[in-house]
Image (cartoon, rainbow, N blue to C red):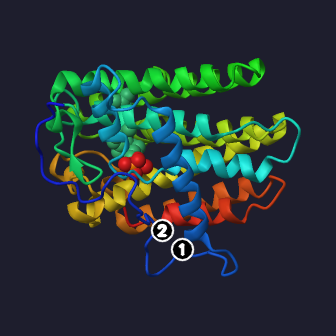
Amino acid sequence: MGAKKGPAARRGPGAAWNPFANPAGPPNSGAAMDFPGQFEQYRLRVERGLDELVPAADTRPGRLHAAMRYSLQAGGKRLRPVLVLAVADTLGNSDRAADPLPAAVALECLHTYSLIHDDLPCMDNDDLRRGRPTAHRQFDEATALLAGDALLTLAFQLIGRHYADTPELCTALTREIAEAAGSEQLIGGQMEDLLAEKKSNATAEELEFIHLNKTAAMITAALVAGGLCGGATPDQLATLRRAGRPLGLAFQIVDDILDATADTATLGKTAGKDARADKTTYVKLHGLEASRRYATAQSESARAALSQLPGNRAFLSALVDHMAARLR
Ligand code: GRG
């Protein structure tokens, strides 16, 4: 198909991989629940959904679809789509529940678009993502740009196609995801991040703005999309929004900690970039120990918010703990 031959992938498409293989385990994991097993079941559902709902690599133009699939199938943790499925399952026993899988796949497409564009030479200029050469390294810059554009658009195609029979749900999902992805959230967070990098002395307030929008917005959208598919009441949707903010912040603080402490092979992306670029991060502003304490506190707030939901919340609660204890 004309893609450049790059280093062999360390993980094949959809290969089993446990992002939470932390020998110490998360602090609050319940012994009664098989968290890795349940996570794996959700992850496999996401992999199958991606395979079914994303155009095949032999669908014209094959090079574009191959590039989209290349980045999608590179072995991401699938946290956002798993959150969609898990929230929908937790709530989803009402007559209003709808299949959350297309929404879950849409969120992963959108997230992957943001990673492809973030890696481009005009942004972060990175060579490695999800343990593989970045899309523009494996293909070329124009193909990577178009693959990102197409994944962003596909997210909304999927919502339109799969929820057309439930117009209220279709509108609510479209609005939720578009708001999270737009210039006031994801793209706005990325813009401020690029501006902050130039001055390398962002304030704590600026850093929080960046991470709330770059990271927490998509995590909140995943929780709310799961709630919408699970027939959540307005109060339950508000609870999910309340949980998204601290969960997203905890996730980002851990990302900063891992950038400072883990190696490239473990992360599957270039480690130590923040310090080399003298980028303002939680670790730079507050130090490692305070960052760890802050991440734990944010995780606890997220878990407390989610405890307001009805249903069996054991998996969701364990997922929050594992997101803070992750090793990559
Ligand atoms: C280009 C519009 C645009 C946005 C880019 C996602 C992003 C914004 C930048 C990537 C770098 C970064 C540190 C983003 C913060 C969010 C984050 C930690 C993303 C990585 O998410 P993971 O760890 O990735 O869930 P995988 O590969 O596992 O899906």
Tell me the kind of residue under disc 1.
Answer: Pro
For this rendering, which residue is in front, 279 or 204? 279
Q: Is residue 268 above or below residue 241?
A: below
Q: Quadrant of residue 226?
A: top right
Q: Position of residue 88 (x, y in %)?
A: 72, 46
Residue appearing at x 67%, y 77% in the figure: 30
Tell me the kind of residue under disc 2.
Answer: Ala
Q: Position of residue 26 (x, y in %)?
A: 54, 74
Quarter the C terminus occupies: bottom left
Q: Quadrant of residue 57?
A: top left
Dot 1 or dot 2: first in sequence order is 1
For this rendering, which residue is in front, 1 or 18? 1
Q: Is residue 75 above or below residue 102?
A: below
Q: Which residue is mark 1?
A: 26
Alpha-carbon neighbours of circle 1 within 10 Å: few (<14), some, or many (≥20)? some
Q: How many marks?
A: 2
Task: Classify mark 2: helix, strand or loop.
Answer: helix
Marks 2 and 1: in contact by CB < 8 Å?
yes
Task: Classify mark 1: helix, strand or loop.
Answer: loop
For this rendering, which residue is in front, 2 or 75? 2
Q: Which residue is mark 2?
A: 325
Residue appearing at x 44%, y 41% in the figure: 211
